[in-house]
């Protein structure tokens, strides 16, 4: 490595730079473990790079997966360095679009070093690694956002621009929430493929399990399958999935239900009713929140009302989740529970505001009385003075 | 003229007498309300009575009000108690105890926590806030200091 670092030719010196950060270097591996040759012949250039001593040179894109797998697919060997590391990367890679094309001789598709880097490979839990969760979208987009590079594959190149504006992208890239999904959470990493129509809901359901369970038991599941439609994606989109709001539900402008359900269909009526129920609870929550806020700002302690408001809001969120059952009864049950809690909060806030009103009336009345009394007292003192003067 | 003067004096006396009486009444009212305060809970208490001893069977739980927020008091199968904030760390829904799976569960988005309050499945990004439990006599107190 020391020889390469001093070579004036940048092509030969650059790989040796940055190796101090390489996870392999930290575990005691050297150049020859990947490139072959004789690591003991440090003063003999010819011997060190001799074919007879196993020198392989720089592996190409087609041989590289096998080279890395020489160690990374060996469970006994890998266990010495990390007992929990997976050893199925190559077998997964061969099932991926990248791996299949690589097997067919395509050197442009991603292989190990395309994502992990070449020299200076960092562990995937190192925040500077290109495969650290928050860095994955940028790493994938190096190729997938390059129109020229992707042109032969006829693959869209807008995934990153859509993802970065999505609720998932915002959580990962803007808020640094590492549990938010990156590309590999839906597509896989070493076995990356686009999820098939049948498996979209399974992919989303990895995190959104409540919605998946409701959807799977709903009439929509069968209908989507019959029409060869994906599940979640039809309403929510894929890379551009935005934070859902109530305007998506129902049959008014901007709602997704009316895109499939005709005006005279039962689905249209159910969608309309679901929206009405959700809107009713949300509006009630907003009006009661304003009432409670007014009482709080007037100095009243509104803990009990705030507690009930929290329960009402929980019911609203549960009702929004229950929408995925596409059943009026399921949503009505949650909305009813929410209305009960909000009624308690409203009663509490109204009582507090009545108390404030009463206190104000007392204050005004007593203030007026005080002024009148002061005037009367002044008058009486003058009368008393006159009586004294008259003698 | 004299008659008018007497009338005005009487009026002023009556006015002052009434005023003094009303002022006295107001003072008595304020004193009574001070001695017997209205039923307003303490704002943001640091400790509340969550339950009475024997109220919860082993393997059950209850939601209690901790100031403005819900808390979850859990009685483990071995009879010991644990308490957590009942607010899900995902989107602030109220969580509940599921005896069938021995998990703390959020119905809004199927978030699961273990009985240490640690998020173990679903969307919750963080564990639940843990509270302290103190048993004094027949009452089970829960404090913010976990």
Image (spheres, coloured by chain):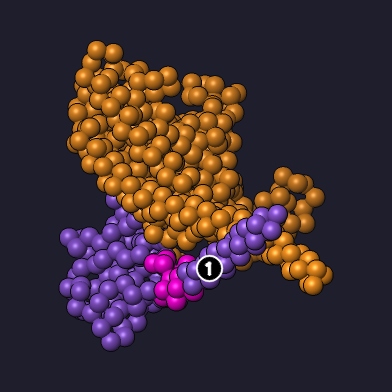
Residue A17, image x, y percentages: 70, 55
Instruction: Tell me the colour chain A is drawn in.
Output: orange
* Mark 1 lies on residue: B21
Q: Is residue B19 visible?
A: no
Magenta-colored stretch includes residue A213: no
Residue A287, image x, y percentages: 44, 41
Vertical relation: A230 (above or below) B70: above
Apparent side of residue A26 relative to residue B71 in the rendered image (left or right): right
Q: Chain of mark 1?
A: B
**Magenta stretch in the rendered image:** B30-47
Apparent side of residue A234 relative to residue A216 in the rendered image (left or right): right
Q: Residue at x 31, y 83 (%)?
A: B135
- Provide the secondary structure element on which disc 1 rests: helix
> Crowdedness of circle 1 by 10 Å Cα count: few (<14), some, many (20+)?
few
Vertical relation: B62 (above or below) B121: below
Q: Residue at x 51, y 49 (%)?
A: A294
Magenta-colored stretch includes residue B35: yes
Residue B52, image x, y percentages: 25, 77
Between residue A181 and residue A281, name the one nearer to us. Answer: A281
Instruction: Tell me the colour chain B is drawn in.
Output: purple
Q: Is residue A11 visible?
A: yes
Q: Residue at x 40, y 32 (%)?
A: A246
Q: Quadrant of residue A278?
A: top left
Magenta span dominant secondary structure: loop
Between residue A173 and residue A29, name the one nearer to us. Answer: A173
């Amino acid at each position: 490595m020391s020889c390469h670092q001093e070579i004036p030719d940048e092509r030969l010196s650059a790989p040796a730079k940055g190796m101090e950060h390489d996870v392999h270097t930290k575990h005691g591996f050297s150049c020859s473990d990947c490139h072959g040759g004789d690591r003991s012949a440090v003063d003999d250039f010819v011997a060190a790079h001799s074919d007879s001593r196993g020198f392989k040179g720089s592996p190409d894109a087609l041989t590289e997966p096998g080279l890395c797998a020489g160690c990374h697919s060996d469970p006994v060997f890998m266990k010495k360095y990390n007992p929990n590391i997976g050893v199925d990367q190559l077998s997964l890679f061969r099932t991926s679009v990248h791996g299949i094309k690589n097997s067919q001789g395509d050197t442009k598709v991603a292989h190990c070093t395309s994502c992990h880097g070449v020299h200076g490979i960092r562990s995937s839990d190192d925040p500077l690694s290109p495969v650290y969760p928050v860095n994955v979208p940028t790493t994938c987009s190096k190729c997938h956002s390059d129109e020229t590079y992707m042109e032969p594959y006829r693959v869209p190149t807008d995934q990153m621009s859509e993802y970065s504006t999505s609720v998932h992208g915002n959580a990962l890239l803007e808020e640094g929430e590492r549990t938010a999904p990156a590309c590999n959470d839906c597509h896989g990493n070493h076995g990356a493929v686009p999820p098939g129509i049948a498996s979209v809901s399974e992919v989303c359901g990895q995190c959104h399990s409540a919605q998946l369970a409701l959807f799977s038991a709903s009439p929509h599941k069968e209908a989507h399958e019959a029409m060869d439609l994906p599940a979640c994606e039809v309403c929510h989109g894929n890379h551009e999935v935005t934070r859902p709001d109530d305007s998506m539900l129902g049959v008014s402008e901007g709602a997704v239900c009316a895109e499939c359900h005709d005006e005279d269909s039962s689905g249209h009526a159910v969608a309309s009713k679901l929206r009405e129920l959700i809107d009713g609870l949300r509006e009630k929550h907003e009006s009661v929140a304003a009432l409670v806020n007014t009482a709080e700002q007037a100095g009243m302690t509104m803990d009990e009302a705030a507690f009930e408001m929290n329960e009402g809001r929980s019911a609203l969120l549960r009702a929004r989740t229950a929408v995925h059952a596409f059943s009026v009864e399921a949503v009505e049950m949650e909305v009813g529970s929410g209305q009960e809690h909000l009624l308690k909060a409203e009663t509490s806030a109204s009582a507090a505001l009545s108390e404030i009103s009463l206190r104000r009336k007392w204050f005004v009345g007593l203030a007026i009385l005080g002024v009148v009394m002061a005037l009367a007292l002044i008058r009486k003192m003058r009368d008393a003075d006159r009586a004294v003067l008259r003698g | 003229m004299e008659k008018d003067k007497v009338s005005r004096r009487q009026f002023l006396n009556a006015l002052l007498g009434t005023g003094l009486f009303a002022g006295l009444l107001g003072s008595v009212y304020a004193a009574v309300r001070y001695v017997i305060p209205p039923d307003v809970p303490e704002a943001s208490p640091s400790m509340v009575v969550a339950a009475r001893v024997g109220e919860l069977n082993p393997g059950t739980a209850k939601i209690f009000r901790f100031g403005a927020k819900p808390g979850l008091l859990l009685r483990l199968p071995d009879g010991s108690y644990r308490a957590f904030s009942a607010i899900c760390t995902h989107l602030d829904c109220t969580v509940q105890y599921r005896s069938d799976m021995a998990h703390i569960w959020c119905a809004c988005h199927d978030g699961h926590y273990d009985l240490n309050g640690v998020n173990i499945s679903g969307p919750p990004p963080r564990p639940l806030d843990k509270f302290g439990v103190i048993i004094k006599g027949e009452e089970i107190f829960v404090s913010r200091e976990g």
